[in-house]
Image (spheres, grey):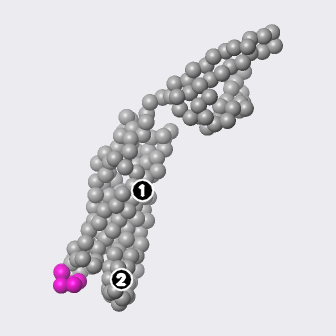
Amino acid sequence: MALSGNFSKYPSTYLGLYCTWSATQSVTGNYSDVTLKVYLKYASLYVGARDDCTASINGTSETFSSPAISEDDSSTTHSKLLKTKKVRVNHNSDGTKTGVKLSASWRFDGTYAGTSIGTITASATISLDAIDRTAPTIKCTVGSITANGFKISATSSAKADIWQYSTNGTGWHNSNAASGTA
């Protein structure tokens, strides 16, 4: 399981698709926003624009266009970002998410370095990091009771960004506590 990675497909040593992916997770929403970046890696290359490229995340596919490329410097490998795609992937009720399919394709239709190449398709199936679905435990204690007031202390098993209190159950006020577990 992971929150980032890469995969590729090189039908020729100097021509292929290289893809990176990353995910940011929402604990409260129980989902991951997965971003796929599709790169064309090549040495010397002359091709026209393409309008039938695809990128897919977890079954959500998109057709996109790629520009014409005219590069005759074969002394180095070039990298061109073709597409960035982002999709929200909902996790299971237990916070897990496996079997997320990622893929990208780009049509070449020609011979490159002696290899006949049609459409290059790179794909991977990933498992995302599980999102903790256990509810935090909170313990409250009351002390320093006087005729004019009392003190409430609280601790939590998870970090709270904001601690709030209510004296009537409807109006909430921020406490002076900093974000943390107490």
**Vertical placement of residue 171 versus 16, above or below:** above
Quarter location, residue 154: top right
Quarter location, residue 114: bottom left
Give the residue drawn at x 61%, y 37%: 161
State the residue lying farthest toward the right.
148
Q: Which residue is mark 1?
A: 22
Amino acid type indicated by mark 1: Ser
Which region of the structure is painted magenta? 111-116
Q: Secondary structure at mark 1?
A: strand
Give the residue drawn at x 32%, y 58%: 102
Q: Residues within 10 Å of mark 2 (few under 14, many from 20)?
A: few
Query: Mark on residue 139?
Result: none
Q: Is residue 27 left or right of residue 128?
A: right
Q: Residue 136: x and y, percent?
A: 50, 28
State the residue lying farthest toward the top.
147
Q: Residue 30: x and y, percent?
A: 45, 41
**Vertical placement of residue 9 versus 88, above or below:** below
Q: Residue 61: x and y, percent?
A: 35, 60
Quarter location, residue 35: bottom left
Query: Mark on residue 76?
Result: 2
**Vertical placement of residue 17 versus 78, above or below:** above
Quarter of the picture holding the C terminus:
top right
State the residue lying farthest toward the front.
75
Give the residue drawn at x 37%, y 79%: 78
Is residue 49 shown to the viewer in this render?
Answer: no
Q: Residue 144: x and y, percent?
A: 73, 13
Amino acid type indicated by mark 2: Thr
